[in-house]
Amino acid sequence: MEKKNNNNKNNNINKDENNNIDTKITQKLLSSTVEELNKELHDPNLKLSNKYTVLKILGKGTFGIVYEVKNEETNELFAIKKVYQDSHYKNRELQIMKELNHPNIIKLNNYFFTKGDNDNETFLSCIMEFIPETLSNILRKYAKEYKQMEDIYVKLYSFQMIKSLAYIHAKGICHRDIKPQNILIDLNTHQLKLCDFGSAKKLIKGQLSIAYICSRYYRAPELAFGSREYTNEIDMWSIGCVIGELVLGRPLFPGKNASDQLVEIIKILGTPSKEDIIDMNPKFKDHKFPNIKPYSWEKVFKLKMVPKNFIDLIEKMLVYSPVKRITAMKALCHPFFDELRNNKNLILPNGKKLPEDLFVFSEEEIKSDEESAKILMNNNI
């Protein structure tokens, strides 16, 4: 969510008091119990086409709560995300979710609004398909067992993550909060879904956006430089960080705070050139940085077994200049993914085939980069 710009002085009266009220409402939402949520879903005034039973709470965030439900007629499982419609923040999530239809994007099935203790309190609940596992949990399990993720899964998950970006970027949408917690995986089929579009926005050239966005470890350097005219390429940086984490088993840039985040990036990429700084945020073009030499990616991953083309992909994704950063469609054509593209009958370690729609591309993806699309679809367009 993005905080609204409000220049009306009258609207700023009692602002602190209103924020305290909003905080109390959010805190109350986050303390909801399964019993309370069930009572809400079975309210006779709630006009839903299906009846649901709440099974358990899956997670809580800054603005809302996610819980698992079961369709009482079909026994099918769904996830419901309930968020407070804070008047101080822009919530674009519902409108964006309505526009999305892609195998690597979480699917919105339905939605409804409810009131709180008074008519000024409005809550949005989105009913979405249920995917039981997050990439964050999967990475935690590998770390606990001191194992490195299998190369084929690194490729398969990376390909699907990038493919989800190719789709939303083709539609002009920037996710702005890519991280392992927002990536869901069905461990039976190994199909991956990008979720949580609470921070997503359609970026328009010349229109300013807030710079303090995206979770710290995955925040692109232009955001650290305070850029407010960034592009969809901030998502490619974030995905590059996640892909590196698949192999390394921990975050690439674990900054302790916002300023330290840039320090962590400089430790590996070295001092940005003046040209890079101008591409990130020209306001800093005269800023002097200590001369730090880059640390090679081979050394970063020296204790891991990685092919050279993996290092090459990381190098193309994690560059300072967003202009020089590889796009999603071109990244899908990278040699690192040759094993997937050239062996579509590949059998995964769990005995399953690759997801059926792995090489099915939407009209938006194809039109965004027809040259890359031809490569990905073996010239069948």
Image (cartoon, helix red, strand yellow):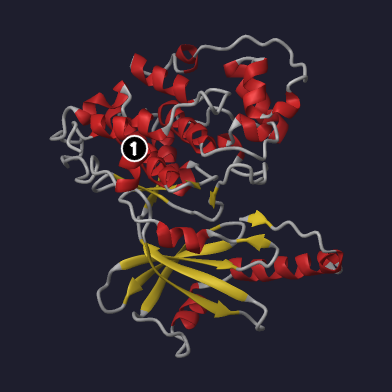
Instruction: Judge whether 119 appears above or below 256 on screen.
Output: below
Query: Percent x, y for residue 106?
Result: 38, 55
Residue at left offset 13%, top offset 35%: 345
Tell me if mark 1 has few (under 14), some (14-19) or many (20+) residues whose alpha carbon lies within 10 angstroms of its own.
Answer: many
Label 1: state its secondary structure: helix
Quadrant for the C terminus in the image: top left
Residue at left offset 43%, top offset 45%: 137
The one of 276 and 260 positioned closer to us in this rendering: 276
103 vs 212, left or right, is left
**On the image, numbered disc 1 is attached to which residue?**
157
58 vs 189, left or right, is right
**Which amino acid, by three-letter code, is at mark 1?**
Tyr
Quadrant for the N terminus in the image: bottom right
Q: Is residue 224 visible?
A: yes
Q: Residue furthest left?
A: 345
Task: Give the quarter of the image for residue 4.
Answer: bottom right
Q: Is residue 306 visible?
A: no
Task: Give the quarter of the image for residue 27.
Answer: bottom right
